[in-house]
Image: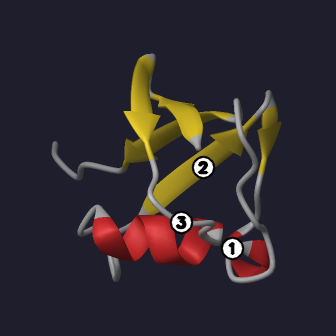
């Protein structure tokens, strides 16, 4: 299954939830925002959100600074 992640095509070998993808990418515990097909997905829904072929995801990591 192919998705688009931050503008780049990515092949997934198995169906994943958004939470599983976030874990695979090493973002667990980080402050992130996820947009799926133009809509923000609240963190509370990451585990229930199953990814589908051709989903377009944007994941941004919050960076602190001054």
Identify which residue is drawn at 80% across, 27% down: 38
Q: Look at the picture and state if 24 lies above or below 9.
A: below
Left or right of 61 in this view: 12: right
Quadrant, the N terminus: top right
Closest to the observer: 55 or 57? 55
Q: How far apart are marks 3 and 1 (CA)?
A: 17 Å
> Under tag 3, what secondary structure?
loop
Left or right of 8 in this view: 58: right
Q: How far apart are marks 1 and 2 (CA)?
A: 9 Å
Disc 3 vs disc 1: which is toward the camera? Answer: 3
Quadrant, the C terminus: top left
Disc assigned to residue 14:
3
Q: Which residue was labeled with disc 1?
A: 46
Mark nearer the N terminus (2 vs 3) = 3
- Within 10 Å of disc 1 (Cα), the crowding (few <14, some 14-19, many 20+) is some
Closest to the observer: 5 or 45? 5
Disc assigned to residue 22:
none
**Percent x, y of residue 16:** 59, 69
Mark 1 near mark 2, Cβ–Cβ under 8 Å?
yes
Identify which residue is drawn at 23% across, 69% down: 26
Mark nearer the N terminus (1 vs 2) = 2
Which quarter of the figure has residue 31? bottom left
Q: Which residue was labeled with disc 2?
A: 34
């Amino acid at each position: 299954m192919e998705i688009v992640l931050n503008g780049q095509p990515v092949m997934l070998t198995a169906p994943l939830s958004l939470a599983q993808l976030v874990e695979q990418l090493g973002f667990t515990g980080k402050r992130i925002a996820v947009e799926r097909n133009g809509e923000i997905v609240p963190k509370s829904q990451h585990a229930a959100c199953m990814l589908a072929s051709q989903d377009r995801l944007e994941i941004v990591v919050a960076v602190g600074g001054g």
